[in-house]
Amino acid sequence: MQKIEQRNATVFTEFILLGFGDLQEIHIPLFLVFLVIYIMTMAGNLLILVLVITDEHLHTPMYFFLGNLSCLESCYSSTILPRMLASFLTENRNVPVTGCIVQFWAFGFLAATECYLLAAMSYDRYVAICRPLHYSALMNVKICLQLVAGSWIGSFVVNTILLMFILQLTFCGDNVIEHFFCDFTPMMKLTCDDSHQVELLSAILSSLCTLPPFVLTIASYVYIISAILRISSTTGRQKAFSTCSSHLSVVTIFYGTLITVYLLPDTKELRQLNKFFSVFYTILTPLINPLIYSLRNKEVKEALRRTTRRCANCI
């Protein structure tokens, strides 16, 4: 009945993203905070990407995946933060319907790619720790390229299929989205059409993009932890764990906040909490990742020192 009533409402061409409209008195401080976060996120991820490309000591499978992850995180932040920063300054929260749908597509595509890249990195750590004698054969250049290409291309295709269905929908009635970016569920609440098929398709495709890599990641770490516990010496256990601790931290933060957001009931009371966790995995996680890999990784710090010395010698 509600959908039938909505069909008689005026079709609109713009969404209004409320974002943090209820905190209008502190918009300038919020703008400065998120601007610093964006600058640090881009600088950190681009620095790691440059180090991975230019330092031959980092030309290994693990850092090849890390370089792709840093590139992805830079795109991920640029999908959401620039529009948010502009809204803080201009107070213009209007977003064209097509632009909102494309933002959701870019967000979904990059999030799905991150799931697969994290799974590929966990498989790399599994091979390095559990099957070290076969590492060079199981993680050669061809396999690494296939894993990365499969992550990007597979996620692109899956999310583009969903995009084609969403673009066929019309939106009418209330055009207000109580969020700071264009997420799937808030948009579906505003469509005039029957969205059940699109929601079912989204659930199926989302499962394909999250469950297999999540299960692979968990399985890899079950084997990794079992192998580490079988190492007799404390030094050996610490050395083995140090090779995957950074990645494990990133996986825990990413999946922990992602699962929390999408398991929370969509109620008015929990909407602000949902928004808080969404800020964490869409904005803070891309900032935290390069910090984790740089502060806890001796090879990255050594590569940074070598690059700094080379730049100093060139001056």
Image: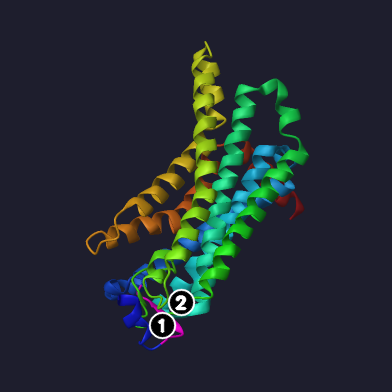
* Viewer-closest of 121 and 40: 121
Find residue 86 and name its label.
2
What kind of residue is marked 2? Ala
Verify whether residue 17 appears in magenta: yes
Verify whether residue 30 appears in magenta: no
* Residue 102 percent coordinates (x, y): 54, 71
Quarter of the image with the N terminus is bottom left
Image quarter of residue 14: bottom left
Q: Nearer the viewer, mark 1 or mark 2?
A: 1
Q: Which residue is at 51% across, 58% downward?
A: 40
Whether residue 296 is visible to the viewer of this picture, yes or no, is no
For label 1, the crowd category at 10 Å Cα-Cα, with few meaning under 14, some 14 to 19 and many 20 or more, is: some
Say left or right for 31 vs 115: left
Give SS at disc 2.
helix
Say left or right for 80 vs 29: right
Residue 281 vertical placement versus 176 (above, below): above
Give SS at disc 1.
loop
| Magenta stretch, residue numbers | 11-18
Q: CA distance from mark 1 to mark 2?
A: 8 Å
Return the disc, 1 or 2, that comes first in the chain's sequence: 2
Whether residues under marks 1 and 2 lie with C-beta atoms below 8 angstroms apart, the answer is yes
* Residue 108 percent coordinates (x, y): 52, 60
Q: Residue furthest left?
A: 269
Q: Which residue is at 55% across, 53% downward?
A: 112
